[in-house]
Amino acid sequence: MKLGFIFIGLSIFSSILYGSTLFVIWTHQHLLNKGMTSSCYITPLFILAYSFLMLFVKYINFDSLYCSIYMVFALYLGYLLYAFLTALIIIIIQVFISLPPTFGIALLYGSPTIICIYGVINALITKVIRIKLKFPGYKGKTTILHLSDIHLGPIHQKSSVERIVKETKELNPDIVVITGDMADGILKVRPEWLRPFDELTIPILYVTGNHEEMNPKQDMIEAVELTKIKYIGDHGKYKFKGINFIGEDFGNDLSICLANVEQEEGVPNVLLYHVPKLRPEELTKYNIFLFLAGHTHGGQLFPLHILAYYANACFSGLYSDEENKHHVFVSEGVNNNSPPMRVGCSRVFGLITIEGD
């Protein structure tokens, strides 16, 4: 059954990759008033061969070569998205006016190149979102640094964690929480990549996301447990400075896991779960004050925002109920899945302070 799903998934992905590349080539030929040749149909097959070469290299354990191939392919996927959209816009324009061939070709290849260069640069710029929330009866003041979607793997490794730790020290939070997707697919996360987190003298809590399912999950948890990071994803709880942190792994049924959460007087309950499945109005019945999630990447590459928006109960940023008593914060994530670029969203560090009313 699992192999069947993998085969279907690869078939769909290959078809989309081939068709999108072919459409860009067809648009190129159309702008030059030339027909499609046999080489036009063969060229996308080299792209497909490259993608399967990446899988082959991974499974014979050439990790450094795999990372290089993965990076090039990831950049191509980002480029192809905007080349396809540009080609589509050109064809629509051509219905009404005839573009000069030179201008059309420059537009077809120049626009996605500029967008991708911007996306790569934008993905490196950190946006700190500062939020203050009040909880009745809470006697402390605690600042939580919320990180999500670190995606360690072929593109992001130890140097990325070193940068995260450096930025964390500058923000000086009381506690760090990581809401899943520490991993980025089938390349196993090595404990040495996580070692820089040991430099932090504050608690670091962690739950898994959907990408840990491929890593595989148990290997990811074992790598985390060799560091100072505390894994609390299996219905775990961690009390810190009068706040009750509740951790659930990706795939857990929240309606069952949260059914018996009690509300202590003056103690905020904070839920850590990767996917933003619940809206603020739903948190009342579970006694959850704040729900921290990630997963959406803020859409990562516009216009994929539309899909991410409708696929999740909450999309990006802070959501509160009408009485301002229950909140959901969805991080757009630290790093990226596949294309190392962001268009229409940001690399986000959420700095959330909870204090008494």
Image (spheres, grey):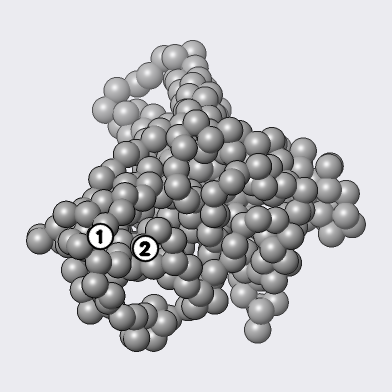
Q: How packed is label 1: few (under 14 Cα within 10 Å), some, or many (20 or more)?
A: some
- The x, y position of residue 135, in whole percent, is 22, 59
Kindly identify which residue carries mark 2: 243
Residue at left 20%, top 62%? Answer: 137
- The x, y position of residue 85, in whole percent, is 42, 37
Q: In front here: 73 or 323?
A: 323
Q: Helix or strand or loop: what does disc 2 sit on? A: strand
Res 245 visible = yes
Q: Helix or strand or loop: what does disc 1 sit on? A: loop
Contact check, label 1 and label 2, Cβ < 8 Å: yes
Which numbered tag is attached to residue 202?
A: none
- The x, y position of residue 130, in whole percent, is 32, 39
Q: In front here: 164 or 355?
A: 355
Query: If you read the primary sequence from the N terminus, does the residue marked by circle 1 or circle 2 appear first?
Result: 1
Q: Quadrant of the N terminus?
A: bottom right
Q: In front here: 301 or 35?
A: 301
- The x, y position of residue 243, in whole percent, is 37, 63
Residue at left 54%, top 42%? Answer: 335
Residue at left 43%, top 70%? Answer: 246
**Three-letter code, disc 2:** Ile
Above or below for 229 versus 287: above
Res 278 visible = no
- Left or right of 274, for residue 210: right
Kindly identify which residue carries mark 1: 138
- Left or right of 282, for residue 190: right
Residue 74, image quadrant: top right
Give how far apart the Cα atoms at labels 1 and 2 are.
9 Å
